[in-house]
Image: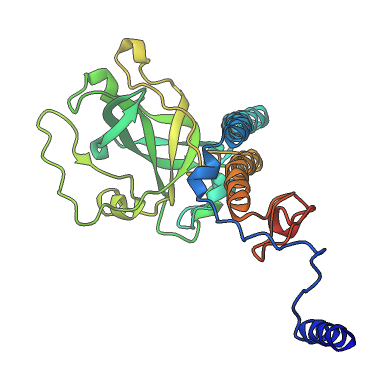
Amino acid sequence: MTWIWRTVRCRRRTDSAGGHRADYGGAVPSPQPARRSFWAVALQPRMIGILLLFLLAAAVCGRLGVWQLDRAYQRAELAAQQEAAEQAAQGPEALGDLLPPQTSFPGELVGTEAWVTGTYEPDGQMLVAGRSLDGRTGYLVLTPLRVTDDGTGGASWASLSGPPVVPVVRGWVDSPTPDAAALDVPADEVRVTGWLQASESMQEGGEPQPDNPGGPPLTDSISTGALVNSWGGPIYSGYVVLTTSDPAQAATADGGPALLPRPVLEGSDGVNLQNLFYALQWWVFGLFAVLLWVRLVRDDAAGTRRGGTHRDGTDDPVGTGIAGLPG
């Protein structure tokens, strides 16, 4: 008996030294659970409920983003209106003080109200094709004005070859052969008030404008670099969009050209950037809500959520949760 007892004790020591559990009172390891597929977890009622909740949050974020985008355009429009009102309250400034002839046109002058006095040269009058007003495509009436006073008493062109010419857009017509009232200009000296706009670039590589029998010559751009060849110089690097003149030209109701709205600097007032960034933030939050649900499903499928099971088969009462945080 003594020999048998010693044999059993030695065998148990050998088993323990080899790392085997011979204690039948210990827990038997549970088999490693099979990993579930993404869609098997996603189609569970609990996950569908969470998805609907997250989609609702994403829809709210998307709607808030659209509201901020509308606010961005509204604030930009209000800012443009306020700027126009402030400039109108200040009154027009002398053209020569803002923009001497033969000098480059600063972008901040776009939409600035200016006045200049001179004499129209109707023989050089042109129509600018392909211009829209209130959704209708027509022509701009472009007339050269030989300047007699730009507010500097002639000092702005004293070193030049003579009095300069400034292009004046007197309005818009819907036909290349408008009524005579649209082409008639006030005789003698006229004081013109209008919005400043920068010279356009010449259209290179385009088809030349056709002849215009019964009407003025056609052009496709208001380029002072090209106009100086027809009108002579010196010339201003911008043009004036007429608002009023003294003496007055024919009114629109009497067949005169329709006046144009205040020009704006392209890209300067399309949208308020602060509200645009707010809109983008809301849309990112909505996208994050959907991605959060995807991550929840993936974690649940991998068995890493709260109360899940490690890959090695041991229980995990806490769980790693999303991004390693408690679930």
Residue 96 image point, x, y percent:
55, 47
Residue with the most extreme right position: 2
326 left or right of 266 in image? right
171 versus 109 height, above or below: above
The quadrant in which the N terminus is found is: bottom right
Q: Residue drawn 49% across and 57% down?
A: 104
In front here: 3 or 257? 3
Residue found 81% across the figure and 70% down from its top: 23
Q: Quadrant of residue 121?
A: top left
Quick one: 253 or 305, which is closer to the camera? Answer: 305
* Position above or below: 10 against 284: below
Residue 291 is situated, as x and y percent measured from the top left of the image, at 58, 47
Asked whether 37 or 116 is in front, the reply is: 37
The number of numbered discs placed on residues in the rendered structure image is 0
Extreme front residue here? 1
Residue in front for this viewpoint, 36 or 32: 32
Kindly tell me whether residue 267 is visible in this rendering.
no
**In the image, 21: left or right of 31?**
right
Residue for point 29% across, 48% down: 231
Place residue 325 in its image quadrant: bottom right
Q: How is the image coloured?
A: rainbow
Q: Residue 186: x percent and y percent?
A: 36, 24
Q: Residue at x 76, y 56 (%)?
A: 316
- Residue 73 is left or right of residue 191, and the answer is right
Q: Is residue 30 visible?
A: yes
Q: Position of residue 138 (x, y in %)?
A: 26, 28
